[in-house]
Amino acid sequence: MKQAKACVLTINGGSSNIKFALFEVGNLLQRILEGRIERIGLQDSRFIVKGLNKADNFSRPATAANHVAVVGELMDWIEKRFQRGELTAVGHRVVHGGPKYFEPQRITAEMVEELHQLQPFDPEHLPEEILLTEAFQCRLPDLVQVACFDNAFHQDMPEICNWKWGLAHE
């Protein structure tokens, strides 16, 4: 019996697009495909994929009315190509986790609620990133989701740098 491979999907959600990559887990992570769905909410949305397998390479119109629909279209496509159980986790790039969230960690309902409170800090990206995590939760409730926060970069900067760049703690 063939053992199913384990794969991790990474998501980088923006205000009008998402970028994604699928990695096969082994001794090393190997990116087996990458892509994007762009112009979300517009009539000329595109779904673009480049993969190691040439059959996975395409660019086609997308039915991307919103970020929730994008998750459906992306997962429909992934589930046609991979066995059930091969997708073991989704990693999300999240722009800002406030003072509490800066290290990569599993997404919980509590975290999502707190991220909702932080939306005013980045109203162009954070709302869509939250929608993506919620859409994956609805589609695949047992799938592990992990958030990696951009503000992790600033955690070890000297206070003078944080002050200069407007990141000083109050």
Image (cartoon, rainbow, N blue to C red):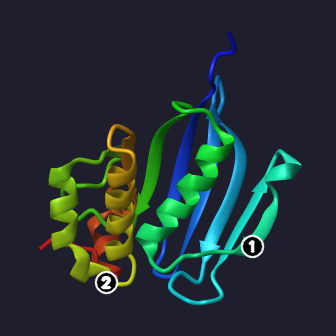
Q: Residue furthest top?
A: 1
**CB atoms of marks 1 and 2 within 8 Å:** no
Q: Residue 97: horizontal and vertical position, in percent? A: 27, 62
Rounded to the nearest angstrom, the CA distance separating label 1 from label 2 is: 29 Å
Q: Residue 162: horizontal and vertical position, in percent? A: 30, 72
Tell me the kind of residue under disc 2: Pro
User: Regarding mark 2 in the picture, which secondary structure is present there?
Assistant: loop
Q: Residue 123: horizontal and vertical position, in percent? A: 31, 83
> How many numbered circles are shown?
2
Tell me what residue is drawn at x 56 percent, y 32 percent: 86
Q: Can residue 157 be seen in this view?
A: no
Q: Residue 32: horizontal and vertical position, in percent? A: 73, 44
31 or 50, which lies in front?
50
Disc 1 or disc 2, which is closer to the eye?
A: 1
Label 1 crowd (10 A; few <14 / some 14-19 / many >=20): few
Above or below — where is 87 with respect to 11?
Answer: above
Tell me what residue is drawn at x 18 percent, y 51 percent: 109
Sequence-wise first label, 1 or 2: 1
Tell me what residue is drawn at x 39 percent, y 54 percent: 136
Q: Name the residue under label 2.
A: 123
Q: Is residue 146 visible?
A: yes
66 or 80, which lies in front?
80
In the image, 67: left or right of 165? right
Q: Name the residue under label 1.
A: 60
Tell me the kind of residue under disc 1: Arg
Above or below — where is 116 with respect to 134?
Answer: below
Quadrant of the rendered structure where residue 145 is?
A: top left
Quadrant of the rendered structure where residue 113 is?
A: bottom left
User: Regarding mark 1 in the picture, which secondary structure is present there?
Assistant: strand
Quadrant in which the N terminus is drawn: top right
Label 2 crowd (10 A; few <14 / some 14-19 / many >=20): few
Quadrant in which the C terminus is drawn: bottom left
